[in-house]
Image (cartoon, helix red, strand yellow):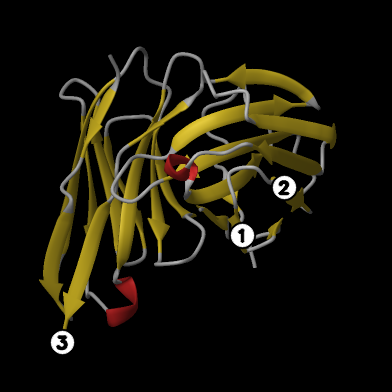
């Protein structure tokens, strides 16, 4: 079966750095997405990785290791507005997105 | 503003009611999706349309009936729902379904409660 695993909840402090991990087992791989979803709002696209390595975009970075079936989202200089759920999704061999249950990130002052 | 709108934002319906959810995208995309989001569960893909043709139906019960009259509009018709169908229903669009790099743009969702 296809499976995406990520922690259910994480807590971090304003100004700090947090890493949200995602491991996957899918039939085929055509890229991995990270989305952010604030409570009561639509998920919004953060990043896409299809090759191994680190992609940096401002305070957010996303890393992929295809051989390990592993990705992480790194958030630096945390702000209160970063409190949200972070969803990991993998595009499988049919280009269908397989989603994780999301990681709820709580930022404390 | 994401370019994908959904109405209504909230809906309470009885098990014998018939209602419809509406989604509209203003992004010129060719693919549209319906997802179900329940608390602490992964997004469940329900239906996919590409160029107005249904390309995926992930074993969704027949009490959910999609309609895609054109590439900009998508409906989800609901009838004789069950309490376990209560969830957030999200609509999304993307440029196409046959390329991995096309991110999906989501609407704000309809919070459905079945009583």
Give the side of residue A12 with respect to residue B66, left or right: left
Q: Which residue is mark 1?
A: B11
The residue drawn where x is 32% and y is 59% is A85
Q: Position of residue A91 (x, y in %)?
A: 43, 26
Is disc 3 on the same chain as disc 1?
no
Can residue A65 be spotted in the picture?
yes
Give the side of residue A11 with respect to residue B77, left or right: left
The residue drawn where x is 61% and y is 44% is B92
Q: Circle 3 — which element?
A: loop
Q: In what quadrant of the picture does the N terminus of chain A appear?
A: top left
Extreme-front residue of the structure: B16
Q: Chain of mark 3?
A: A
Disc 3 versus disc 2: nearer the observer: 2
Tell me which numbered mark, 1 or 2, is placed earlier along the sequence.
1
**Callouts 1 and 2 close, C-beta under 8 Å:** yes
Q: Position of residue B13 (x, y in %)?
A: 61, 54
Could you say which is closer to the camera, residue B104 or residue B115?
B115
- What mark, if any, has residue B19 been given in the picture? 2
Q: Which residue is mark 3?
A: A109
Disc 1 versus disc 3: nearer the observer: 1
Determine whether A67 is above or below A12 in the image. Answer: above
Q: CA distance from mark 3 to mark 2?
A: 44 Å
Could you say which is closer to the camera, residue A51 or residue B5?
B5
Q: CA distance from mark 1 to mark 2?
A: 9 Å
The residue drawn where x is 72% and y is 21% is B54
Toward which corner of the image does residue B71 lie, by quadrant? top right
Extreme-right residue of the structure: B69
């Amino acid at each position: 079966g296809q499976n995406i695993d990520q922690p259910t909840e994480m807590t971090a402090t304003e100004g700090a750095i947090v890493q949200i991990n995602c491991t996957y087992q899918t039939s085929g791989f055509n890229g991995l997405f990270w989305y952010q979803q604030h409570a009561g709002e639509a998920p919004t696209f953060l990043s896409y990785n299809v090759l191994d390595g680190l992609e940096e975009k401002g305070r957010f970075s996303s890393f992929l290791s295809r051989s390990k079936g592993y990705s992480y989202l790194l958030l630096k200089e945390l702000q209160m507005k970063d409190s949200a759920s972070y969803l990991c999704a993998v595009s499988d061999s049919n280009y269908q997105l397989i989603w994780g249950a999301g990681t709820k990130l709580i930022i404390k002052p | 503003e994401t370019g994908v709108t959904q109405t209504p934002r909230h809906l309470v319906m009885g098990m014998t009611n018939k209602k419809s959810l509406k989604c509209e995208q203003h992004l010129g995309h060719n693919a549209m999706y319906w997802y179900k989001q329940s608390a602490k569960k992964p997004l469940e893909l329900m239906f996919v349309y590409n160029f107005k043709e249904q390309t995926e139906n992930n074993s969704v019960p027949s009490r959910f009936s999609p309609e895609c009259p054109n590439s900009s509009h998508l409906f989800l018709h609901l009838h004789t729902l069950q309490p376990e169908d209560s969830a957030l229903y999200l609509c999304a669009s993307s440029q196409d379904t046959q390329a991995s790099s096309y991110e999906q743009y989501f609407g704000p969702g309809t919070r459905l409660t079945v009583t």
